[in-house]
Amino acid sequence: MSEISSTTTEAPAVVNGVELAAEMGLTSGEVMRAVELGVIPARDLAKGWSRAVADTLVPRAAEVAEAVADAASLGATRLAALLAERTGLQVAPGDVVALAAAGHLRTLGEYKGWPLYSVRDAEALAPVEGGPGAFVLERQVGERLAWLSVSAEREEAAERLGWGWREFDKLVKDELIRPGAGGRFALADVEALAADQELAEQVAADRLLGPDQAAQLLEIRRVDWDCVVAAGWVTCAEIVDSRRGTHRWVQIPMYRTGDVEALKQLPWVDWDEVRAVKPGKPSALREFAHRAPERAKVVRQFAQDVADRHGVEVWALYDGSADRWEMDWDRLESDGGPSRARVRAELQDDQQAAQYATEIRLGADWGKVARWARRMLEPDVAVILDTETTSLEGQIVEIAVIAADTGKKLLNTLVKATEPIGSGAFWVHGISNQDLVDAKAPGWEKVLPKLRKVTRDRIVLAYNASFDRARVLGHSANVGGRPMHLADPEVWDCLMEARSTFTGSWRWLPLGGGHRALGDCVSAREVLLTLAKGRGTAAVPAQQRAEAR
């Protein structure tokens, strides 16, 4: 008779994230999310949870799963797709936003500035067998579709009027027409504007023309137009930046069509005589061209003088919205450059520039960003990092790091996750679960030491720093790894926020790296290089110009 022997496996004294998930019958992603929500306490030991704590958590598995499910969230686009699939209705992202505004959906967080909405609340609005929530959703979709039939997008509304979108936007700013739901405009309001002949004439008069277009309107040569401007008969309404080639920008003065048309009535000018002058001959208007230099020319000359005096690169930018100039330079007093007080005093002492002193602002937010960017591009100061993940709040499946100064690749690897890649994430970055298997991707516990090494004593730049930092810390906690210096928020800096400050626009501006970690790193570095160039017209010191020659 044979004896049957059995072995007893002792439960581990220290439980990491994967082991705790297995004991609770959850995924590791659910455990990590539960920790973020505070439903599960943070680990009490360096490498995980003690056996005593784990034993208290296992009986709470159902409670934890419920809390995580209640906190599940999606963006408006993906949630609209979910609702459309469940109901067959034409649900759009705007419907999700409207339902949230009406209190039918909770907003549970945000991703890259976009709100995330409760999946559970959405499912209540799309019950499988109908219910009160279904009526709310049907009514919202029905009202939106009805509104679409009697309204138009901004571009369509402007086209119906025969105006440019900038002209249309001015009417919106002046509240002559107001947008409705979804930023659309009622066709009835558009038709009312089209019938207003006086308004149409005013819009036409306010249209801006460049110097060449203004000359064409008057049927004169460009040299004649330059004399008109020098004589002071017309003033530019705005100065715009225009690209010339890859890196060069020039500033173009723009004039109101109405002001140019009014020049035809000047009693002391015989326009037929002006037009009769043969090509190559001096303008008949040259006797009137004795006006002092224009403001733009004076400001640019003052910027060049500051650059030559102090050996700094000076940027001059015209702000059309405020009708003023902004000036900044690449080195402040602490780095051997002039102080703003010093340049202000020099401005007052400059005979030509002083007349525009109140119209020149010294120092700008974008100048501060440009100096920061140049600092980040110095040798061995910063690296640029990007990650791709299993989901918005999931684990890392790819990470890349490059040197900010040279663009040299320091780290680029797929990462084996302990949870599957979600379908939404796959359609973003294209990395599949099989890709990780085929590449024999290392686990995060093996990648983390390499990441710590290439980022040690460096500023870590990421396009969305809060997202990438959270993913690094979350995955490290999941495997019981130590992020060390990467846990310090002061080590990280955000290129997306810097770009928004630089441009003055806080709308989402995507990268062009194809949502792969290395490609996004390269694209993020291109953003950094752009920030480092400053804005407007650059005046470089005389010595630097001589060296360039």
Image (spheres, rainbow, N blue to C red):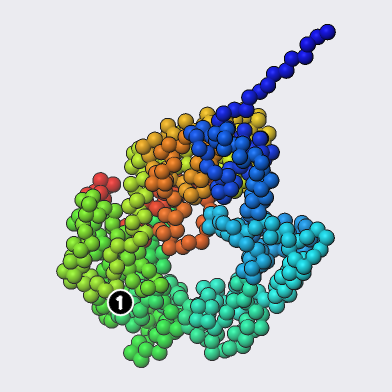
Judging from the image, what secondary structure is the residue with disc 1 in?
A: helix
Image position, residue 46 (x, y; %): 48, 33
Q: Residue furthest top?
A: 1
Q: Nearer the viewer, residue 403 or 278?
A: 403
Q: Position of residue 304 (x, y in %)?
A: 25, 60
Front residue of 57/220: it is: 57
Residue lying at the far bottom of the rendered structure: 267
Near-viewer residue (181 or 13): 13
Residue at image location 28% in from the left, 47% down from the top: 548
Total of numbered circles in the picture? 1
Q: Residue at x 69, y 46 (%)?
A: 62
Residue pointed to by mark 1: 230
Position in image of residue 401 (x %, y %): 47, 38
Please say if 8 is above or below 544: above
At x 53%, y 75%, the residue is: 169
Determine the residue located farthest toward the left in the rendered image. 349
Q: Is residue 317 above or below residue 266?
A: above
Residue 257 makes an appearance in the image: yes
Quarter that holds the N terminus: top right
| Residue 503 in the image: above or below residue 218 | above
Tag 1: residue type? Ala
Residue at horizontal 37 percent and vertical 73 percent from the top: 322
Whether residue 222 is visible, yes or no, is no
The answer to whether 330 appears left or right of 492 in the picture is left
Where is residue 56? Give x, y as percent.
61, 40
Label 1: few (<14), some (14–19) or many (≥20) C-alpha neighbours in 10 Å: many
